[in-house]
Image: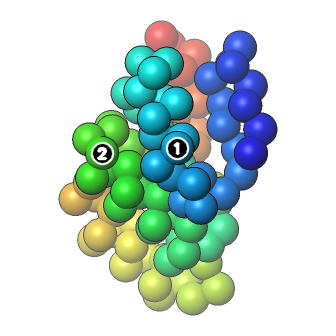
Amino acid sequence: MLDSSSQGVMTGSLSRSIGGMLSRFRFGAIQWLVLCGVATSGVVLSTLRQAADADYRIIVLRDCCGDLDAEVHACLMNKVFPRQATVLPSVDFTSALQDA
């Protein structure tokens, strides 16, 4: 896990230690999480569920996630994740950051 506090970026497998990380995020007044990674049906799904249960606002970068099973990936992105997160392409996310 890499903590780049100056940029507000955390990398690594968040789902393995989500409880401790969510506490650190709350302490730092972090409200939003942007998720990407491999595998969509594994670490991304697990992290999304736990973060949603902890009332974080979540963005999933559709084109920055992947899964060996394309059908499962599509189902998660199109049907499951939108119930608890905003799912969008990375270009839309980076454009929004530049406009802010």
Q: Which one is in front in this view, the residue at disc 1 or the one at disc 2?
A: 1
User: 78 left or right of 88?
Assistant: left
Q: Is residue 12 above or below residue 6?
A: below
Figure quadrant of the N terminus: top right
Residue plotted at (41% across, 27% down): 26
Disc sitting over residue 78 in the figure: none
Which residue is identified by label 1? 20
Which residue is identified by label 2? 54
> Residue 54's x, y, as percent?
30, 45
User: 5 left or right of 86?
Assistant: right
Number of marks drawn: 2
Circle 1 crowding by C-alpha within 10 Å: few under 14, some 14–19, many from 20: few
Residue plotted at (49% across, 18% down): 28
Label 1 SS: helix
Label 2 SS: loop
Circle 2 crowding by C-alpha within 10 Å: few under 14, some 14–19, many from 20: few
Mark 1 vs 2, N-terminal side: 1
**Identity of the amino acid at label 2?**
Ala
